[in-house]
Structures are given as C-alpha cells and as structure tokens.
Image (tube, rainbow, N blue to C red):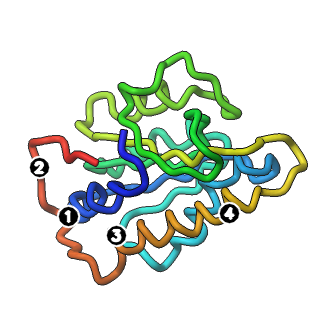
Amino acid sequence: MYTEDGLLEGLTKLCNHRTIIIGVGNTLKGDDGAGPLVCRQLVGKVTAGLIDASSTPENYIQQIRDHTPQCLLIIDAIDFGAVVGAIASFEPEEMSPAITSTHGLSPRLFVDAVCRDIGTVAYFIGIQPAQTELGHCMSPEVSEAVHRLVRILTVAFGKAADTAMSVKSDSRPAI
C-alpha cells in the first residue's frame, strides 16, 4: 500500500504504459461518488483512458479487455480505516475477494475478471469516505481529496507527460 505521499512517484512510473483510469461509485451516495468525480475532472487533462463506471464496473469488463491496457487504476471510496479524505493505493492481492461494496461485484472479483488472460496489472486508489448514505452530499474532506488526486493524476498522466503508449513492459510497474 502506498499512501498519498508516495503516490505521485509510483504513478509517474506508469506514464509510459497504456493505462485506463476507472472511476467507481454512486454519486447519489455522498462520498461514494469520489471515483466518478475524479474521472469527470480528468477529462481532457490526461493521456490515460477514462471510464466512469459508476456503480456497475462489471458492465465495462469486455470493453476494457478489448483495449488490452497494460495498467488499470480503479478509483473508489474504500474504507481502509484511515482519516476521512486519506488517499492510498492497493494491489488487488491486498483486497479480499469477499469485500463487499456498494457496487454489484466485489472490487477484487472485478479486477480478476478484467485481468484474466490479458496480462493487465491493476491497482486500486482508495479515498477514505466519511459516509456513503443515499441522499447525502460529499463530505468536504473527500471533496478536497478528489481535488488532490486529480492534481496527482494530472501530473502523472497529463497531456505534457511522455505518451509513448506502445512501450511494453514484462515487469509489473509498482505504485
């Protein structure tokens, strides 16, 4: 797991890889809408592909597989026991397949389904939510975390970043 301080350095290593950023969450459930909001704010700012998967990431499995990305970054509100608004990255192995979420398919099973047979590596970037209740607004701490993460991703994958997307890597890039 990387915390926010090491995230930019880790993400910068991925800028030469075909990367898709997937925002997951329900914008009607307060802080759970962080992932889609990150994706919306990145439109036109990054060279990575963007998918706002809302609360049904499983609907995008085949589309993602067809693009054969080298790396997936799944942005989601994840309760990892930190202070509200904290940002951290996780490898799929750090997430139990049994973790339930507000989404139909567990995050780990989603990644397993996407990555099976195509050699894609995946990372979760979680924002610690305060609440994910229907009808609530996003908390100020998570809203600020969204802005910080957008800045980090824009620096790592910005239009000025090296966009040699055809570079192949046999080793798993680490973030």
- As measured in the structure, the alpha-carbon distance from the residue carrying label 4 to the one carrying label 2 is 35 Å
**Other-residue count near label 2 (Cα within 10 Å), few / some / many at <14 / 14–19 / ≥20:** few
- As measured in the structure, the alpha-carbon distance from the residue carrying label 1 to the one carrying label 3 is 9 Å
Q: Residue at x 12, y 60 (%)?
A: 167
- As measured in the structure, the alpha-carbon distance from the residue carrying label 2 to the one carrying label 1 is 9 Å
In this rendering, the label closer to the viewer, 4 or 3: 4
**Nearest to the observer: residue 147 or residue 24:** 147
- As measured in the structure, the alpha-carbon distance from the residue carrying label 4 to the one carrying label 1 is 29 Å
**Nearest to the observer: residue 114 or residue 91:** 91
Above or below 25: residue 94: above
Q: State yes or no: discs 2 and 1 in contact (Cβ < 8 Å).
A: yes
Q: Residue at x 45, y 26 (%)?
A: 95
Q: Which residue is mark 3?
A: 157
Q: For the residue marked with disc 4, what is the amino acid?
A: Ser
Q: Can you give x and y, in whole percent of width and height, for residue 43 in the image?
A: 52, 74
In this rendering, the label closer to the viewer, 4 or 1: 4
Q: Please tell me whether mark 3 sits on a helix, a strand or a loop.
A: helix
Residue farthest to the left, as pictured: 170
- Marker disc for residue 169: 2
Q: Can you give x and y, in whole percent of width and height, for residue 136 in the image?
A: 87, 51
Q: Can you give x and y, in whole percent of width and height, for residue 65 in the image?
A: 37, 42
Q: Which residue is mark 1?
A: 16
Of mark 4 and mark 2, the one earlier in the sequence is 4
Above or below 139: residue 124: above
Q: For the residue marked with disc 2, what is the amino acid?
A: Ser
